[in-house]
């Protein structure tokens, strides 16, 4: 399961702040406050936000890690209350929510994170088995593509519009249809990642014209950012390489993996050459 407060890398820190903002927004709904703005302050042992209101001043909302128990947090608030009652000191004091509670527990969604670290793990696995279906020249291509994927990922910044809880395995085998409506199944990879990563897993097996149709359908519900194609192609190659890393250890898959390389390496060559390929029919190599 995902450690909510894990932020060993910049990517994990950004993902943590996306999750934390959702927790903060959920928590603030439990107070009788007409708040106007929520502003991130600091990430350390806790995550703090400044809550601004039009009528009741400003407040600090604090999200705790598991370092302190509920009772320890409550005892700190009681101590601050006692200090204020002494009239010798003026210190911050906790306020109760609409139900009279000073400390709340907010349920969070947990699961794996799909990004740079997970991709590197898949590349490490692929390195052990690539000789089963790749030539040395092919492996060099894969390594170059992986470096470019990681480089691109470091420039992306998760926010509430592009990042969140995803299925992470939305291929046709994980879709069932009832009365022409699709329903996803098999949520075994469900976790946190970019929404475009989720889409890339679906586009991987589609013809270019069908990719465009799917994106048009998606945008009828939720608009994509203007420069989405560049990032989507990065996730396309990332997902493809991860798939090969997953299947490479199974000898029963070797023949089909070898057969697919004429197409896979054609996509990789286009990606490395900075030529857009998502809506083009790419000739196999």
Image (cartoon, rainbow, N blue to C red):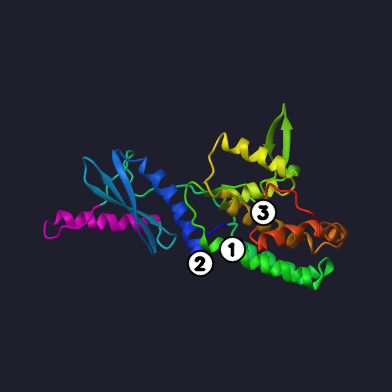
* Nearest to N terminus: mark 3 or mark 1: 1
Answer few, some or many: residues within 10 Å of disc 1's Cα (few below 14, many 20 plus, some between 14 and 19): many
Residue 218 falls in image quadrant: top right
The residues tagged by marks 2 and 1 sit, at their Cα atoms, a distance apart of: 10 Å
Observer-side mark, 2 or 3, equals 3
Look at mark 3 in the image and give the residue it sits on. Answer: 236
| In the foreground, 195 or 186 | 195
Report the residue at 30% width, 41% height from top.
35
Local secondary structure at mark 2: loop
Left or right for 47, reference 4: left
Answer few, some or many: residues within 10 Å of disc 3's Cα (few below 14, many 20 plus, some between 14 and 19): many
The residues tagged by marks 3 and 1 sit, at their Cα atoms, a distance apart of: 14 Å
Local secondary structure at mark 1: helix
Q: Is residue 86 magenta?
A: yes
Q: Which residues are magenta?
A: 70-93
Look at mark 2 in the image and give the residue it sits on. Answer: 9
The residues tagged by marks 2 and 3 sit, at their Cα atoms, a distance apart of: 23 Å
Residue 119 spot, x, y in % from top left: 64, 63
Residue 141 spot, x, y in % from top left: 72, 68
Look at mark 1 in the image and give the residue it sits on. Answer: 116
Answer few, some or many: residues within 10 Å of disc 2's Cα (few below 14, many 20 plus, some between 14 and 19): few
Q: Are marks 2 and 1 in contact (CB under 8 Å)?
A: yes
Left or right for 184, reference 91: right
- Seen as rendered, the residue at the extreme bottom is 136
* Nearest to N terminus: mark 2 or mark 3: 2
Observer-side mark, 3 or 1, equals 3
Local secondary structure at mark 3: helix
């Amino acid at each position: 399961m995902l450690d909510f407060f894990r932020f060993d890398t910049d990517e994990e820190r950004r993902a943590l702040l996306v999750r934390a903002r959702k927790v903060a927004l959920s928590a603030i709904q439990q107070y009788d406050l007409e708040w106007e703005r929520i502003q991130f302050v600091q990430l350390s042992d806790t995550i703090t936000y400044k809550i601004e209101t039009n009528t009741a001043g400003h407040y600090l909302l604090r999200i705790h890690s598991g370092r302190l128990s509920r009772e320890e947090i409550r005892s700190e608030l009681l101590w601050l209350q006692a200090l204020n009652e002494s009239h010798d000191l003026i210190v911050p004091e906790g306020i109760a929510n609409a139900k009279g509670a000073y400390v709340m527990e907010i349920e969070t969604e947990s699961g794996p994170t799909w990004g740079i670290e997970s991709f590197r793990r898949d590349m490490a696995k692929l390195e052990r088995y690539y000789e089963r279906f790749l030539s040395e020249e092919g492996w060099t291509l894969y390594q170059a593509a992986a470096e470019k994927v990681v480089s691109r990922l470091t420039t992306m910044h998760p926010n509430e519009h592009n990042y969140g809880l995803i299925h992470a395995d939305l291929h046709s085998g994980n879709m069932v249809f009832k009365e022409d409506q699709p329903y996803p199944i098999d949520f075994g990879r469900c976790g946190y990642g970019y929404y475009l990563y989720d889409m890339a897993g679906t586009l991987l097996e589609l013809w270019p014209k069908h990719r465009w149709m799917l994106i048009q359908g998606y945008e009828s519900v939720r608009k994509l950012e203007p420069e989405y194609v560049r990032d989507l192609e990065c996730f396309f190659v990332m997902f493809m390489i991860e798939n090969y890393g997953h299947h490479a250890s199974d000898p029963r898959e070797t023949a089909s993996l070898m057969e697919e390389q004429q197409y896979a390496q054609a996509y990789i060559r286009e990606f490395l050459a900075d030529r857009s390929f998502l809506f083009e029919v790419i000739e196999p190599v």
